[in-house]
Image: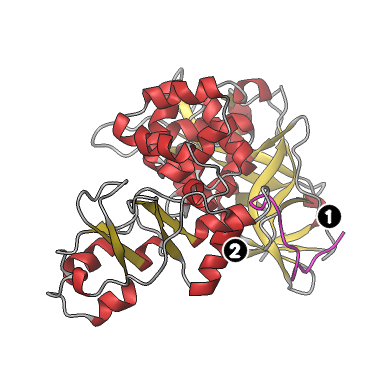
Amino acid sequence: MAATRVYVARLAGLAVLGPDGESIGRVRDVVVAVRYDRQQPRVHGLVVELPTRRRIFVPMLRVTSIEPGSIALNTGTVSLRRFQQRPGEMLALAQIVDSTVRVEDPELTDLAGVDVFVVDLGLELTRTRDWRVSRVAVRGHRRIGRRRTVHVVDWSTVSGLTPYEIGRPGQDVTQLLERFEGLRPADVAHQLRELPEKRRIEVAEALDDERLADVVQELPDDDQVDLLGHLEVRRAADVLEAMDPDDAADLLGELPTGERESLLALMDPEESEPVRRLLQHSPDTAGGLMTPKPVILTPATTVAEALARVRNPDLTPALASMVFVVRPPTATPTGRYLGCVHIQQLLREPPAHLVGGIIDADLAPLGPEVPLTAVTRYFATYNLVCGPVVDDENHLLGAVSVDDVLDHLLPEDWREEERHQGVAVHD
């Protein structure tokens, strides 16, 4: 039976189906028109994410029924134009949920004069076939040893949900962060870009340095610079420290010289030094593409230890495909570079054998000034996903991985582009 009363949180992620049952996408948010009085807001429509990851707007007038596992439309023809929020519209999950409000309900005297947080919104289908926000689920601060009670109250009893009040800085992001749990950094970055700027900055400020660094690395260059510019300068330096050195160098390379030097000065010297070395190279050369922290071993390292090193979950699959063997010291720039060992070779050898006995010394290394086109041919020629970068004195400087090559070969806005093959809807 089709629902006439639903909660926004239940709608998130539901499949949106056309009249023939074809899948169009999934619900990511609900668009409501919040008023300055306490009249129930009208629901304008749904933000639906297509298989291409583009988010479009579907008016509620197109919705014929809301079932437990899906939402049905009366047409398979919807506009593919990217969703753009209009004045007077608010996003239920991205902007209203987590707002601080007060409840004036005579039956809930314990909430009188107390700040509570919105955790969900209840929608109701009216006699005129409009959907309205009729109920608000709120929750207070957590008390030690006690669970926070959720109260569901009428919209008219809630104050603090005007566009002005929702737009004030300092809004909580608990519910948004819960939605991001378990997602890959690239997926969080995509969802972050879809948020209004205010919420995007609030989420960034709430994420810990490591998580934010992983997410920033997946954003387009312009968004990286913009997000970093909204952080307090000390925090920005901490996030740069947590980023991979090559990604931090790419980001700093987009900044004016004065800002770049200020941030480098605030970073820990051990973290800033490899970044400074990378900034000495053009970004479209092997030296500019490389990471200074591949897996580096001495000849006396056992195969068992080498395999343990490449099992590090923080390594990308490309960097884990090869270890590099050098004379001490092993910090880049290293001692004399001896060669590399492919992971397939490590898997074939007894654990007690030394990597010094299975070195591939025939693979020619890359020089730091080798251009991107030559690096690409190098990977294709030798069927590699990772390769060493060595200076004129035979010191290992770092390694280039295929993901960095692809990042520079693709158009600058490749993270923003969408592909439309296989989409079952049209303008």
Vertical relation: 322 (above or below) 390: below
Residue 271 within the magenta-colored segment of the rendering: no
**Residue 372, position in %: x, y?**
58, 55
- Give the residue number, with chain letter if any, for mark 1: 79
Residue at 55% in and 57% down: 405
The span shown in magenta is 414-427
Q: Earlier in the sequence, mark 2 or mark 1?
A: 2
**The C terminus: image quadrant:** bottom right
Residue 419 within the magenta-colored segment of the rendering: yes
Residue situated furthest right in the rendering: 427
- Give the residue number, with chain letter if any, for mark 2: 68
Q: Is residue 387 visible in the rendered structure shown here?
A: yes
Name the element at disc 2.
Answer: loop
In this picture, residue 66 sits left or right of residue 234: right
**The N terminus: image quadrant:** bottom right
Residue at 58% in and 25% down: 256
Alpha carbon distance from label 2 to label 1 = 25 Å
| 334 or 204: nearer the viewer | 334
Q: Amino acid at mark 2?
A: Pro
